[in-house]
Image (spheres, grey):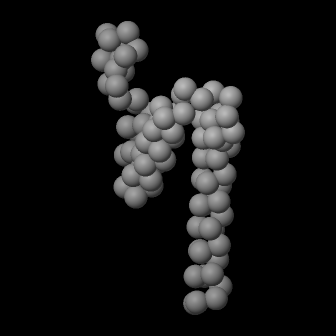
């Protein structure tokens, strides 16, 4: 993969990092990350002609905090789920 990226002057469409995460993470997590990326890509494309609006600020300008918050929230829910399974249901 890396050789193809170098030979195509960094225009290879697949990211080695994305492929690595796709191999390590469960399929449902990889699919949800893909859906989230597709949602933000679509929002950026639809709102690119409106750079000063509130919708553009939320959906295009703050992608990273929204995604980081969702990932952290999912991790906390997973930890809570494990704690309930271990201490309450066992």
Identified at 69% across, 39% down, the residue is: 54
Residue 23's place in the image compared with 9, above or below, is below
Instruction: Tell me the quadrant of the picture where the C terminus can be found.
Output: bottom right
In the picture, measured across the screen, residue 69 lies left or right of residue 33, that is: right
Instruction: Choose top left, top right, bottom left or bottom right for residue 63.
Output: top right
- Which percent across, then down, holds residue 60? 60, 35
In the picture, measured across the screen, residue 89 lies left or right of residue 31, that is: right
Identified at 38% across, 9% down, the residue is: 9
Q: Nearer the viewer, residue 29 or 88?
A: 29
- Which percent across, then down, holds residue 67? 60, 46
- Which percent across, then down, holds residue 71? 60, 53
Q: How many marks?
A: 0
Q: Nearer the viewer, residue 70 or 1?
A: 70
Q: Nearer the viewer, residue 33 or 7?
A: 33
Q: Could one spot residue 3 in this view of the protein?
A: no
Instruction: Tell me the quadrant of the picture where the N terminus can be found.
Output: top left
Residue 86's place in the image compared with 28, above or below, is below
């Amino acid at each position: 993969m890396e050789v193809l990226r170098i030979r195509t002057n960094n225009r290879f469409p697949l990211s080695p990092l994305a492929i690595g995460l796709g191999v390590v993470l469960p399929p449902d997590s990889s699919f949800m990350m893909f859906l989230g990326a597709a949602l933000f890509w679509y929002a950026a494309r639809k709102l690119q002609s409106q750079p000063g609006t509130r919708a553009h600020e939320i959906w295009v300008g703050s992608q990273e905090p929204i995604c980081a918050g969702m990932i952290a929230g999912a991790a906390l829910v997973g930890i809570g789920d494990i704690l309930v399974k271990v201490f309450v249901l066992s």
